[in-house]
Image (cartoon, grey):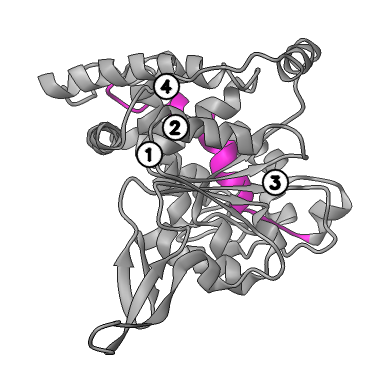
Amino acid sequence: MIDGGMTTAAEAAPAEPDDRALVADLSRARAALVAEVQKRIVGQRDVIDQLLVALFARGHCLFVGVPGLAKTLLIQTLADVLSLEFSRIQFTPDLMPSDITGTDVLEEDPVTRARSFRFLRGPVFANLVLADEINRTPPKTQAALLQAMQEHRVTAGGRTHDVGRPFLVFATQNPIEQEGTYPLPEAELDRFMFQVDVGYPGVDDEVAIVQQQTSPLGSRLDKVLGPERILQLQGLVLRVPAADHVVRYAVKLVRATRPKGEAGDAPPAFVRDYVAWGAGPRASKDLILGAKARAVLDGRFAASIEDVRALARPTLAHRIVLGFRAEAERISAADVVARVLESVQP
């Protein structure tokens, strides 16, 4: 391993010729995707990069930010650029699970008068599902997404229906308005590969946004990829090698967030002080999948330590449950992740 945690050619498995071509194609597609998205979205480059990593790693994302930061527009723009079937669900307190998954309706044949049930597919049957303000609906309705997110299928009326691929759920959440909202259960948060924090734009970006949004001219988007090509590139990410020391480092980071320690592990003292529950094994898997996707988007056919470190915060922060002391001292989960990165060495 060379300095900075990059994997050397000797440590990485050689890519097949077809895979090398796909890596080059994906790296070029990334530049084109960013250029098209930025026709509508000003700034927010880190948010766009994390979104693309999740897309090609087959991971769901939770976008957290105050209103007016173009979270919904960003996701819809990505669907347009990728020619994906897009579905938007506005989560409200009266939304029912069947409003998401679909329901059986009784139909009568006009000739034979025979009656039968037909399943009407809900909005979850799309390539890219936007769950807008997901915390505005009760946990029972939120849970209607869990099976689709994990298994890519929906059970309704005693029958199971595949939702198809590619399939991604991108949810938005308002962090400041708590009246009439329902916290997302930890089991549901764990299904999201990343929590992407969408912050305020810089002054120059905000000026550009105002100019763009008050202009009569709209931006025409060009298609960059289609569903079949996306599936092919998602398969490429799974074939990207991650050296043993990279996988072990990702696992060490995740295990360091657990305050009780396991099998002789000794978590850092600040973790024992501030954390009630740490991240589970799904976080380790998501860290490595994200690192692989980040590598190929950058034109490399091997995941590195630096890829893991770059994705630690969006992968781990929403999976950490803080204790009372952290709340009293105003320590955030992101603060804990930052200190874990400082204390855990590759």
Q: CA distance from mark 1 to mark 2?
A: 6 Å
In the picture, the disc for residue 333 is 3
> Cβ–Cβ below 8 Å for labels 3 and 4?
no
* 308 drawn magenta: yes
Q: CA distance from mark 4 to mark 1?
A: 21 Å
Count of numbered badges drawn on the protein: 4
Estimate the x, y position of residue 60 in percent, counting from the top left. 48, 47
> Cβ–Cβ below 8 Å for labels 1 and 2?
yes
Estimate the x, y position of residue 111 in percent, counting from the top left. 24, 84
Q: Secondary structure at mark 1?
A: loop
110 is higher (above) or lower (below) than 175: below
Q: Residues within 10 Å of mark 4 (few under 14, many from 20)?
A: some
Secondary structure character of the magenta stretch overall: helix
Q: Which residues are magenta?
A: 301-323
What residue appears at the point 50 percent right and 63 percent down from the top-left corner? Answer: 145
Q: Secondary structure at mark 2?
A: helix
216 is higher (above) or lower (below) than 320: above
The residue to which callout 4 is attached is 5
Camera-side residue of 29 and 309: 29
Q: CA distance from mark 4 to mark 2?
A: 19 Å
Image check: 133 left or right of 258? Answer: right
In the picture, the disc for residue 339 is none
Foreground disc of the pair 4, 2: 2
